[in-house]
Image (cartoon, rainbow, N blue to C red):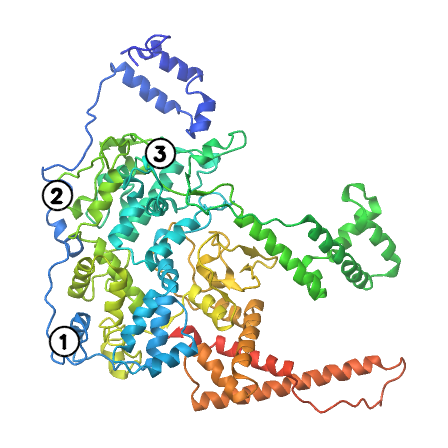
Amino acid sequence: MLKGGKSGPIIVPGKPDESLIIQKIRSGEMPPKKRMLEMGVKPITPSETERLARWIAQGVPEGNVAPDVATTEPDSLVSDKDRQFWAFQPPRPVVVPSVSHAAPVRNPIDAFVLAKLEEKGLTLSPEADRLTLIRRACFDLTGLPPEPDEVQSFLQDQDPRAYEKLIDRLLASPRYGERWGRYWLDVAGYADSEGGKLSADHPRPVAYRYRDYVIRSFNADKPYDRFLLEQIAGDELIDYENAPVITQEIMDSLIATGFLRLGPDSTSEREVNFVEDRLDVISDEIDVFSSGVLGLTIKCAKCHSHKYDPIPQRDYYRLAALFKGAYDEHDWLMPQHAGDGGKVMGTRYLPYVIPGATPVQLIIEEGKREALEQKAEPIKKKLLDQKLAQLPATLHEDLRRMLVTPPDKRNELEKYLAEKFEKILKIEPEELKRSDAGYKKEAEESERQVKLLEFRKLPEPKITALWDRGVPSPTYILRRGDPASFGRLVGPGVPSVLTDGKTPFEVQPPWPGSSKTGRRLALARWLIRQNHPLTARVMVNRIWQHHFGTGIVKTLANFGNTGARPTHPELLDWLASEFVRQGWSIKSMHRLMMTSSTYRQQSTVTPVLEKMDPENLLLSRMPLKRMEAEVLNDTLLLISGRLDETPYGVPEPVLVRDDGLVTPIETEKGMRRSIYVAQRRTDLPTILENFDLPPMSPNCVERNVSTVAPQALHLMNNAIIHRLAEAFAGRVKKEAGADPEKQVERAYWIAFSRPPTDEEKKIGLEALNRLKIEQAKQSLAETKEQKAEALPAGPKAGVDIKVSAPKAEPQEALSALSKVCHTLMNSAAFLYID
């Protein structure tokens, strides 16, 4: 700036009015408005101009630009005492406790739990029966109930290790990754749309590749340390730009970095692509990372030092600096807009180069649309005639003329009639569907094809990824989080409280000659150190929570001072150490937890347990758990025979209906598992939203479990639920035949994975018989009405219309069975897992 270019020096020290830079800014020539718009930078304010002028007037003094980083010197902001808090210390070596009554102890988990129980004079509850155990295990590991034949096979298996073999089979099922991948997608904040500050909620057409990566990783039991490495720094694990061949491993590592691109992001729109908007995106990703992986509320330190945990504001910005090579608010990849030639948007993605990733495009033939419109015409005419019949005949001709005249060409009379009658005479699409079953089927298929086209067409094979792009801009502490108020310069680093406070944070390029910073790779490697205080603890606590209902630390995303203390601290440390010892294997953790006697307990609450352990903090019994949203939806599809288990790929579209309901679109195969249904932030499928599927803003570390009226109303009244009940009844009839007793038994086996009790069978048979009679009576009444209408015109009083006595026909019997099946689908025994 002092040397200048063709126009000479742009700064004259001590003389701001003679400095070219001040002259250009004040005249409005600089910065160029077009360039500011392209870069998403707001114009310089008068106060900023005057601040620059004062700096020039002071002689352009140079400040100390050495970044604030961790050194070997004692940290003045975080003390050794702060580091003594239990969660900030590495897991301690733990001796498995001895217990007075060792008979129930199958593995060390039981010893830790039983030791606590014995302090209160309690012991483990009795073991649940096999019917309960197989249903519990299947839902826990696959999110679906066992089929009746699978239950029978398990009951007949006399091998002492029958239960252990069951666990192994479930862990090997492809359904396992779909179940447990969903948990991680909550942590990551996965959604199929951008979200953010705009109401448009633009779709993310290739986000699903990350979803598929997660499912495959869980199915393959990818070690958790590797799983984290790939998601945080997959682009820095290998020199993919110069690799002779792009392997599946390389592609997976790049797709995995989508973990850091899942948060709400409005910056695809230029209207909300300024520095503060970009900082919001970065803040959300730091929140996802810290809450999901570290179990800390680090986001609180963005504007000021954390109020309760020893996390100074400096450490928040050190952490932000680790992501700066890819997430740089001053070097942001811009969205594509008309006139960009498509080049800019491409820089927001990496190419997907695995063979077979050809975009899917479905073409709807225009001829089919025309045929559908032609079929609608006579139906519209019939409906219009019916509506006109309710109005004075003298208006009919004028009303018909009004309806076919374009609004801008109507005369005064037609405008008057339109204001009064057009709304009630308008034929809505739903009316057409209700009036003609054939038209309804074709119209819904057309709507489905439109949605499939909208979701499945991909402009080009690509992936949403994060990658370093060169030297990042400096990172400053932002006072009160204000992007225009710079504080100290900081370098990359991790929260000081999670270190010994005297070791610098080392960052090296990932390979010699690399242009990448290596910052995120250094972060990932620090995370997966065997003695890291939080990484293993947070993950095993999350696995424990999904199996036992509550985490050992109840606050899954807050291991800090304001979070809950562990109910079994020694058990948590032992599990964390065991997790690392077993190669960070998540499946090994399942096997360990689920084969314990603690997991196999009954859920019965006795008066003694209610008094001594009312909240089940001592794990004196297994909790009763309600199905999550996806489990409920998938189970309804499975028992009705309408579950399409096609894995992976483009998300299945949803239909936003005129009544506001959001429903998946059914195909000939049925509907796919919920994890494969498109989940836009603003249009969640209604059944999933009613049962607490969370909106991702930015993520969800623990779901709410509510009990509200819309849940019961949806299961009772929703048309899709009724169709599934009919399909369930059809399956029962196919498998059990026409014998009512066998039908009731089969329905219970399918819905509850057990036979009905004698009382349940009696009630079921009585209900089935009563419903058949009611259906027959209803059919009889309809038949009499139809015969009466068929008589010649004239007085009909006293005419004896004879019909056969009521007798249930096959269709009426099936209708009665569907009502029984619908009742089972609404029962607590169905919705809750024992």
Q: Quadrant of residue 604?
A: bottom left
Give the residue at mark 1: 119
Q: Is residue 527 above or below residue 30?
A: below
Badges 1 and 3: C-beta atoms under 8 Å apart?
A: no
Q: Residues within 10 Å of mark 2 (few under 14, many from 20)?
A: many
- Secondary structure state at the residue bearing disc 3: loop
Residue type at mark 3: give it: Glu
> Could you tell me if residue 834 is visible in this image?
no
Q: Give the CA separation, mark 1 to mark 2.
A: 39 Å
x, y percent for residue 350: 40, 39
User: Closer to the N terminus: mark 1 or mark 3?
Assistant: 1
Q: Amino acid at mark 2?
A: Gly
Q: Position of residue 792 (x, y in %)?
A: 89, 81
Q: Position of residue 783 (x, y in %)?
A: 75, 83
The residue under label 2 is 501
91 or 53, nearer to the observer:
91
> How far apart, in angstroms, are the residues tagged by discs 3 and 2?
29 Å
Q: Nearer the viewer, mark 1 or mark 3?
A: 3
Q: CA distance from mark 1 to mark 3?
A: 55 Å
> Please, what is the three-letter code of the amino acid marked with disc 1?
Glu
Residue corresponding to mark 3 = 329
